[in-house]
Image: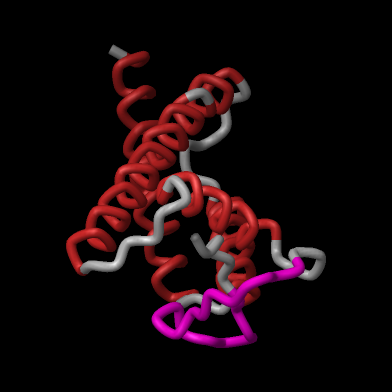
Amino acid sequence: MTTLAPTLPEEMPLATLSWPEPLSTSDEHPAITAGRVALNEMLGGEEPTTLEGWRAVVGEIDFAMASLMAARTMATAQISPLKADQELPSVDLSQERVVINRMDAVARELGIDSRAVSGLMIALIGTAKRQHDAARSSNAA
């Protein structure tokens, strides 16, 4: 069975990924390597050959993404009390910009849609802000 290994030339749309064999990973971005390894684990050595099979793989990836979002939400919840203890505002626009810029750069380096990644990060930051505000409100009551 073919081991999946994506190759991403600069600015290549995700839909045009190729899966060559063999692939030297020495020049591979760490996020691509992690994604390739995760995808190979999900496939269990068997590449789907049907639409339903690939949709099932995408469903597993969606679940993994939701799990990572939940982990991020739990981690950012730990920031709320630290900000409160230091009497810092719950909103830190400069830190938000750092996060969005960092992920925008990663997306561009990976050749994926940076607007989609930035939009996702803005949504996740919004979730964290609501967490911080709710934590402060419950601590003030």
- Indicate yes or no whether the magenta region holds residue 20: yes
**Which residue corresponds to the image point at 35% horizontal and 32% vertical from the top-left?**
131
- The answer to whether residue 4 is above or below residue 71 is below
Determine the image quadrant of residue 20: bottom right
Magenta span: helix, strand or loop, mainly? loop
Query: Looking at the image, which is closer to me, 70 or 41?
Result: 41
- The answer to whether residue 16 is above or below residue 129 is below
Q: Residue furthest right?
A: 26
Q: Residue furthest left?
A: 52
Q: Residue furthest front?
A: 1
Instruction: Specify the segment rendered in magenta.
Output: 7-24
Q: Residue 58 placed where, x, y %?
A: 30, 57
Q: Residue 26 placed where, x, y %?
A: 81, 65
Q: Residue 6 placed where, x, y %?
A: 56, 71
Query: Looking at the image, which is closer to me, 90 or 6?
Result: 6
**Which residue corresponds to the image point at 41% horizontal and 54% vertical from the top-left?**
46
Determine the image quadrant of residue 138: top left
Quadrant, the C terminus: top left
- The answer to whether residue 125 is above or below residue 67 is below
Lateral position of residue 38 relative to residue 109, left or right: left
**Which residue corresponds to the image point at 63% horizontal and 86% vertical from the top-left?**
10
**Which residue corresponds to the image point at 45% horizontal and 78% vertical from the top-left?**
14
Query: Looking at the image, which is closer to me, 46 or 4?
Result: 46
Query: Looking at the image, which is closer to me, 113 or 31?
Result: 31
- Indicate yes or no whether the magenta region holds residue 17: yes
